[in-house]
Image (spheres, rainbow, N blue to C red):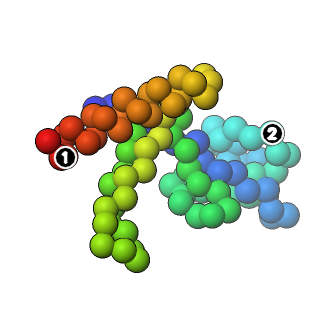
């Protein structure tokens, strides 16, 4: 398995500058970069896998069930749906067969 690379949500608050861009290589169309949420699942900015497919399995917090979240990277919606279905099938076979 290869390491997952994440695209960090970039925040451009008033106290931002250019050090995150210049010294750490964060890219953004925004003029200032105040914060880079490198690993985030916050509603105002989630990190997104940029180099491949992944999945997360976790228990539900409100119901007696397991939730499975998938993430795929593709060039269009049709390919993305196909890849998601293949990933779903592999997960189901691995855990439930």
Q: Quick check: 43 above or below 57?
A: below
Could you tell me which quadrant the N terminus lies in? top left
Relative to 65, is 95 on the left or the right?
left
Relative to 96, is 2 on the left or the right?
right
**Farthest residue, direction left:** 97
Mark 2 or 1: in front is 1
Where disc 2 sits, the SS reads: loop
The image position of residue 3, as x and y in percent, is 37, 36
Count of number-bearing discs: 2
The image position of residue 82, as x and y in percent, is 47, 26
Residue at 85% from the left image edge and 64% from the top image edge: 14
The image position of residue 10, as x and y in percent, is 69, 51
Q: Quick check: 87 above or below 42?
A: above
Residue at 37% from the left image edge and 59% from the top image edge: 67
Where disc 1 sits, the SS reads: helix
Q: Quick check: 69 above or below 42?
A: above
Q: Quadrant of residue 97?
A: top left
Residue at 38% from the left image edge and 45% from the top image edge: 55
Q: Residues within 10 Å of mark 2 (few under 14, many from 20)?
A: few
Is residue 36 shown to the viewer in this render?
no
The image position of residue 40, as x and y in percent, is 54, 58
Seen from the viewer's position, the closer of residues 8 and 94 is 94
Seen from the viewer's position, the closer of residues 9 and 97 is 97
What residue is pinned by disc 2?
29
How far apart in space, not on screen, are marks 2 and 1 (Cα)?
A: 42 Å
Relative to 91, is 72 on the left or the right?
right
Q: Residues within 10 Å of mark 1 (few under 14, many from 20)?
A: few
Which badge, 2 or 1, is on the more N-terminal residue? 2
What residue is pinned by disc 1?
95
């Amino acid at each position: 398995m290869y390491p997952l690379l994440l695209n960090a949500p970039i925040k451009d608050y008033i106290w931002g500058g250019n050090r995150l861009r210049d010294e750490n290589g964060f890219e953004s169309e925004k003029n200032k970069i105040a914060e880079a949420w490198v690993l985030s699942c916050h509603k105002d900015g989630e990190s997104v896998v940029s180099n491949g497919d992944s999945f997360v399995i976790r228990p539900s917090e409100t119901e007696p069930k397991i939730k499975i979240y998938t993430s795929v990277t593709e060039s269009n919606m049709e390919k993305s749906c196909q890849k998601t279905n293949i990933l779903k099938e592999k997960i189901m076979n691995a855990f439930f067969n």
